[in-house]
Each structure stands twice: as structure tokens, then as C-alpha cells.
Amino acid sequence: MKQVLIETIPFNVSPIQLTEGMKAPSGNPMVEGILATAEVKNGNGRYYSKDLWEREIDKYMDVVKGNRATGELDHPESTIINLKNVSHIIREIRWDGDKVIGKLEILPTTSGNILKALIENNVMVGVSSRGMGSLKEMNEGTLEVQDDFELLCWDFVSTPSNPGSYMNLVREGKENNVVNPYTKVNSLLTEILCANGSCPIF
């Protein structure tokens, strides 16, 4: 039976090194990193074959070219992308061995502004796929994602299950000093959420 497949198990990675970020033509910040890895068991104990990912990436490229490859901040338990929660859009996807690499533009939406503030303050964020599919046990502790899998999108999360799926600012030029991951985050989020004269967090 098909189910929503969400990958959200935490793992340890190195801190993001903040640098002068590269901008999209719109002026929005861009981030780049691993979207998926084929032929490995992820933190949820799931295994995606390379053939399966190649098929789904080929299909998803039409979504990217159509300017529709949006995603949300955090994984909802839904197969629908909720536009009011959209934080980013994928602009480029390429293969690097068994890894799917993506370049994403952070949008100036409410969720996108929160994501941008987190990244600018060196808070570690990740990206994780959302799709529909069924599972079959390969061996003890490993479930293979079956051929009926359908990729829906990639969302930003705090704890991705795919190895190495943490986003880094696309950068050029000289590195800046790394800031404390928690410095000024609360004040920045308050400023963003309360920018229109009302403050939903109070």
C-alpha cells in the first residue's frame, strides 16, 4: 500500500560556514547541497535504487523547468504543497555519482524569510524528500522503496535522514567569520513575524 514517505531522522554534520552568498537574478539568496543519495540505507532504514531516483529526477525536471518546483519549511503530513508555507524553489538539479545535487532559491515569503534568517545565523538546516510509495523488506532493518514511488517535492527540515543533506550558502569571494548558531535567531524571527504590525507569537 502506498504511503507518504517522509525522511526526518537526525544525524551529526559539520556546522555551516557562512560566506558572502551568491544571489539569484531576483536578488534572493541561493543554497546548494545534496537532495538525495541512491543505493544507500538512510536514517529511516529506507533504500532507494539509482534507477528509481533517475526516473523520478527525469520527471521532476519538467517541474523545475516549469517554475513549479517549490517546497515547504518542515514536512507536512500531506501530499499537497501548501503555497502559504512555501519557502523555496529548486532552480537546478544535477547528478554527482550517486548523489542528486540541487541549487535552491530562498523566496521572500514568511517561511522563506524564517529559513533565510536561520541560515544567515548559521543554524543547521537540512533538506528532505517527500513522496508517495510502498515499501518492501530487503533484509532486517532495510526497507526498499518500490517502483510505485512518486516524488512530490523537497522540504527544508531540521533533521534530514539522507546522509549529507545539509544545505550550504552558494558562495563566492572571501569567507566571513562564523557566528554562534543561536545568536540573534529569536530576535530575527520576532522581527520577521511581527513586520506587518501584528505579532502572532505574543
Image (tube, rainbow, N blue to C red):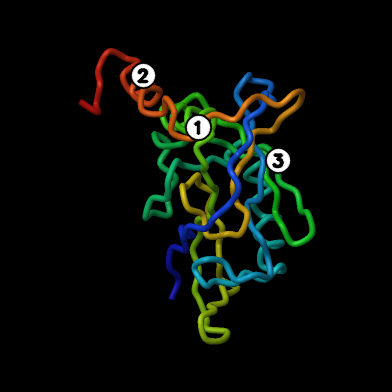
Give the SS element for disc 1: loop
Q: Is residue 150 left or right of residue 86?
A: right
Give the SS element for disc 2: helix
Q: Nearer the viewer, residue 182 or 172?
A: 182
Image point 43% across, 54% down: which residue? 79
Q: Which residue is mark 3?
A: 92
**Residue farthest along the right direction in this orientation:** 97
Q: Quadrant of residue 146?
A: bottom right
Q: Which residue is mark 1?
A: 180
Please tell me whether mark 1 or mark 2 is closer to you in this view.
Answer: 1
Q: Nearer the viewer, residue 133 or 29?
A: 29
Coordinates of residue 7 in the picture (x, y in percent):
49, 60
The amino acid sitting under disc 3 is Glu
Tell me which numbered mark, 1 or 2, is placed earlier along the sequence: 1
Please tell me whether mark 1 or mark 3 is closer to you in this view.
Answer: 1
Crowd around label 2: few <14 · some 14–19 · many ≥20 (10 Å): few
Crowd around label 3: few <14 · some 14–19 · many ≥20 (10 Å): some
Give the SS element for disc 3: strand
Tell me which numbered mark, 1 or 3, is placed earlier along the sequence: 3
Q: Nearer the viewer, residue 4 or 191?
A: 191
Crowd around label 1: few <14 · some 14–19 · many ≥20 (10 Å): few
Image point 43% across, 68% down: which residue? 3
C-alpha separation, residue under disc 2 versus residue under disc 3: 31 Å
C-alpha separation, residue under disc 1 versus residue under disc 3: 30 Å
Coordinates of residue 149 in the picture (x, y in percent):
56, 67
Q: Which residue is mark 2?
A: 191
